[in-house]
Image (spheres, rainbow, N blue to C red):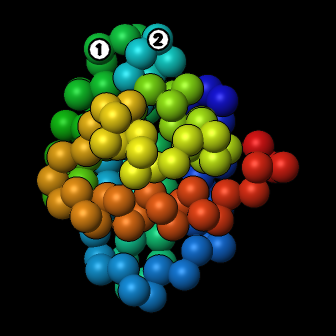
Amino acid sequence: MTYSECADHIGGILGKIDWSDTEDCSLQFNIIGSDNGVFYIIIRDHEADIKVIGSGESGETEKYGDSYEKTYGHTYNVKIVVTAPVLSRLLMKVIDPIYAYTTGKFKMMGEVALGRKVLIKLCDVCDTKSI
């Protein structure tokens, strides 16, 4: 999947997840590599939404994160830096999110335990037949 396809797929499954045990937070996904961009998952009042900030040439993802902070007035609790192919494999359940994190397939900064919890929820609800 491409960056846009990953963001679209995640946006389509957020409503299927039970967020009742998840605190209000925001997760910034920096998709790096030749197909890159930034999107946020924002969880408020046990509901989640996705904000796609933009995509661009390699190396431009940071400016999109900066524009989000200026526009919405807050940053992230968790920042996940990953390539589109790795995110795609996570969503398709080809690789386990905990294994991928511990082996360096992606980086997570900030509240790592919260990031793991949200990633596991995303991967658990993904229907690989719809990808």
* Residue found at x 50% / y 18%: 35
Can residue 11 be seen in the rendering of this structure?
yes
Residue for badge 1:
59
Q: Is residue 111 left or right of residue 32?
A: left
Splitting the image into 4 quarters, where does residue 117 fall?
bottom left
Q: Nearer the viewer, residue 23 or 4?
A: 23
Q: Residues within 10 Å of mark 1 (few under 14, many from 20)?
A: few
Q: Residue at x 59, y 36 (%)?
A: 88
Q: Amino acid at mark 2?
A: Ser
Q: Dot 2 corresponds to which residue?
A: 34
Where is residue 14 shown, x and y percent of the image? 58, 65
Q: Is residue 129 left or right of residue 52?
A: right
In terms of depth relative to the viewer, which is nearer, 97 or 3? 97
Mark 2, other Cα within 10 Å: few <14 / some 14–19 / many ≥20: some
Q: Residue at x 31, y 59 (%)?
A: 115
**Residue 31: x and y, percent?**
41, 30
Q: Place residue 72 in its image quadrant.
A: bottom left
Mark sitting earlier along the chain (2/1) = 2
Using the image, determine if residue 66 lies above or below residue 73. above
Mark 2 vs mark 1, CA separation in Å: 9 Å
